[in-house]
Amino acid sequence: MSRLFCSKIACIVFVLMLACVSLGAAAQAQKLVILNSGSQDGTMKAVADFTAKTGIEVEVLISDWGSFNDKVLLMLTTGQQLDLIRCDSGHAVTAANNGWLYPLSNLIKRDNADISLIAKNVLWYAPNNENGEVWVLPYNVAVTLLFYHRGHFQEAGVDFPPVEYGHQALQWDNWIAMSKKLVRVDPDGKVTRWGTHIGVPAYFLIGAFNVDWVSPTLDKFLGTTQEVINAYNKLISVFMTEGAAPKPAERSGLNFLGGVNLASEVRQTGTWMLTVDPKSLDMGLAPPPWGSVVAVQGGVNSWGITSTTKNLEAAWEFLKFFTLGDGLISWMNYESKSPLMNRRYFNQWVHLMQEFMPNADLSVVLGAGNYLWNSQISNTKPWPQIQPIFEGALNEVNNGVKSMAAAMEGIAGQIDLLLKESAQ
């Protein structure tokens, strides 16, 4: 056997070995690692549909929100594989600010991914910027709307709330007047049914008066401005002065789903909707009340690709499947029943919910995506330090201990200092 022939054989073997190594690396690259704050079982079932369609294996890691950021940071800085993270609104902002996410704009443009199917205010919710970068793609939301018991409205002879956003009947003063007609008092003067209740932290609704708690640059607390003081006083007047809703001290035993002592409630969508028995609770749904503008408080759930992924194309396929494709249904079936904000799949969510709320106009939920708003104060870096100071002061206002002006003046210096330090 000639030396030349042996050399050729050796070259062929070497090439085949390289090919095998490449194939092995490619196969290894087809395994993704994702992090979710949710259920292990539901997530595993949802991603199984993705694997069945694409052949790409997925390892599922689960973390609670309290340790989520620490886990992401540890994995990325120690070189552990982590390809995708599932975020709520606050964690998405943190991830983008810390450089943990891969920018998506070029991938969207390259594949002509139809992100126009996502409601505009949902798509461009922080950290995404319409004039900048797309960091995450949303798949569902939690939105604050007006839920009500149709039977109480019928008993009181009050028209059902309209389903159009910005309708005059839902303007703040008119909403309060409507709610007061639903209040019932026994002969001893005890309220047996309240007209309404704000079932989320009231400060999150201040966007309905076209103001926010912090400046757009997130470096100045605005709680002491007259505009914010007036807006918050107007917001809480529904229970502080108007008597349409209970004050904090009067909320013991309040139970909207009990269907007896509360005619309506401003509350977020959620899994509680799956517990409604239409035989005993005839539920209705309307847009939230508004002050000077329509602003629907809510939060966005999304997927992002990590900046350290070595499996970009596989990760991108996963992200598209669970935000723009049939993975939305898989996720809804197994992991989360929150409203889908992709117009192509919204009817599937409506079909699911109609079993529990057959007389509610569920299109109201889809419309909420066009008005989604949340206070930027929760997107500030020092929000974990600000929150107890801020909420403590507002609790004093809500309980009549301090005036709004005095309470805000008492905390403004602390919050401004935290905002200033975080900007350095």
Image (tube, rainbow, N blue to C red):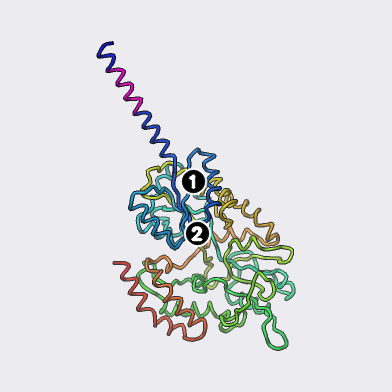
In magenta, the rendered stretch is 7-17
Residue 192 lies in the magenta stretch: no
Majority secondary structure of the magenta segment?
A: helix
In the image, residue 118 above or below residue 1: below
Q: In screen coordinates, is 331 left or right of 221? A: right
- The amino acid marked with disc number 1 is Lys
Mark 2 neighbour density, 10 Å: few (under 14) some (14–19) many (20 or more): many
- Give the camera-side residue of 42 and 343: 42
Tell whether label 2 touches label 1 (CB within 8 Å). no
* Quarter of image, res 169: bottom right
- Measured as percent of width and height from the top left, residue 70 is found at 38, 59
- Measured as percent of width and height from the top left, residue 402 is found at 47, 86
In this view, the residue farthest toward the bottom is 188
Q: Residue at x 37, y 75 (%)?
A: 415
- The amino acid marked with disc number 2 is Val
User: In the rendered image, which residue does mark 1 sit on?
Assistant: 320
In this view, the residue farthest toward the left is 3
Residue 9 lies in the magenta stretch: yes
Which label number is shown at residue 300? Answer: 2
Q: Residue at x 57, y 82 (%)?
A: 249
Label 2: element kind = strand
Q: In screen coordinates, is 20 left or right of 44? A: left
